[in-house]
Structure formats: C-alpha cells, structure tokens
Amino acid sequence: MPHIIIEYSQDTVPATTLKNWVDGAFETVKATGLFETENIKVRAHPVMDYRLGLPDTGFVHAMCRIHIGKTDVQKLLLSQSLLVALQIGLSEAVVVTVEVIEMDGMSYAKKSPSV
C-alpha cells in the first residue's frame, strides 16, 4: 500500500511525458516517508470520453487507496503532496483533484510474488 490510481483526460498529459509524470507521482509519495518504497504502486489510466461543466477543461484525479491507520495530518500530507506533483507540466485549464481512500482490511486480499 498505497495504490495511487490516476485517471486523466487523455488530452491532458502528453504521451511523451507520461512516464516522467507517473515516476514523479511515485517519488512524491516516497518522499512523504509514510510508506515503504516496495509497497508504493502508481498507475495511470487515460480517459478518452468525458464531459466537464467547464468548457475546454481537462482533468486529473488521483485516488490514493491506503490501509486504515494514518492520521488526518498524514493523509493531508499525502493528498497535498500529490496535488502539487500532479500539476507539474499541465495547462492551467486542467482541474486536478486527489482523494485518500481508506480500504476495508476485511475485504482486501493480496498475493505477493515469491522472492
């Protein structure tokens, strides 16, 4: 944990900078010191079809799925750090949002690779 799942309007992030953008999000989460590096997962999903109330506007939305147990201050650090990182290289005409979601430990299952 955490899983950082980023949805973005496809025309928001140039394909040539997508890897750097995802790597930047990863490094930002790592820099918070809230998680072990080997547990951080970042993935980005482009959205081709969308509609926003603001014309000529794109979007980026990051869902930070974490285990229960972080303080409100820690969750705020995570969301604010990602909010800043995800704006880098984007047009001013992009709405950027971040939410921290605590996962229910009773319904979460995981299979890790053998090392």
Image: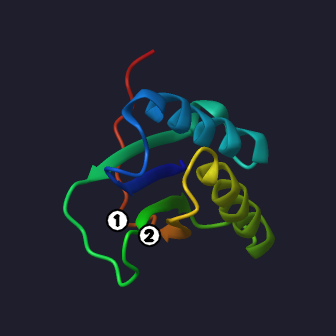
> Callout 2: helix, strand or loop?
loop
Q: CA distance from mark 1 to mark 2?
A: 6 Å
Quadrant that contains the C terminus: top left
Residue found at the far left of this picture? 49
Q: Nearer the viewer, residue 36 or 96?
A: 96
Q: Residues within 10 Å of mark 2 (few under 14, many from 20)?
A: few
Residue 65 point in image, percent of width and height: 49, 60
Q: Nearer the viewer, residue 18 or 90?
A: 90
Q: Nearer the viewer, residue 78 or 13?
A: 13
Residue 67 point in image, percent of width and height: 55, 60
Question: In the image, is residue 82 above or below residue 93?
Answer: above
Mark 2 residue type: Asp
Residue 103 point in image, percent of width and height: 46, 66
Tag count:
2
Mark 1 residue type: Ser
The tag on residue 104 is: 2
Question: In the image, is residue 108 above or below residue 21?
Answer: below
Would you identify the image quadrant in which residue 37 lies? top right
State left or right for residue 48 relative to residue 20: left
> Callout 1: helix, strand or loop?
loop
Q: Nearer the viewer, residue 101 or 109?
A: 101
Q: Is residue 102 visible?
A: yes
The residue sitting at 34% across, 51% down in the picture is 109
Q: Are marks 1 and 2 in contact (CB under 8 Å)?
A: yes
The residue sitting at 45% across, 34% down in the picture is 18
Residue found at the far top of this picture? 115
Q: Is residue 33 visible?
A: no
Q: Which residue is tagged 1?
A: 107
The residue sitting at 64% across, 47% down in the picture is 88
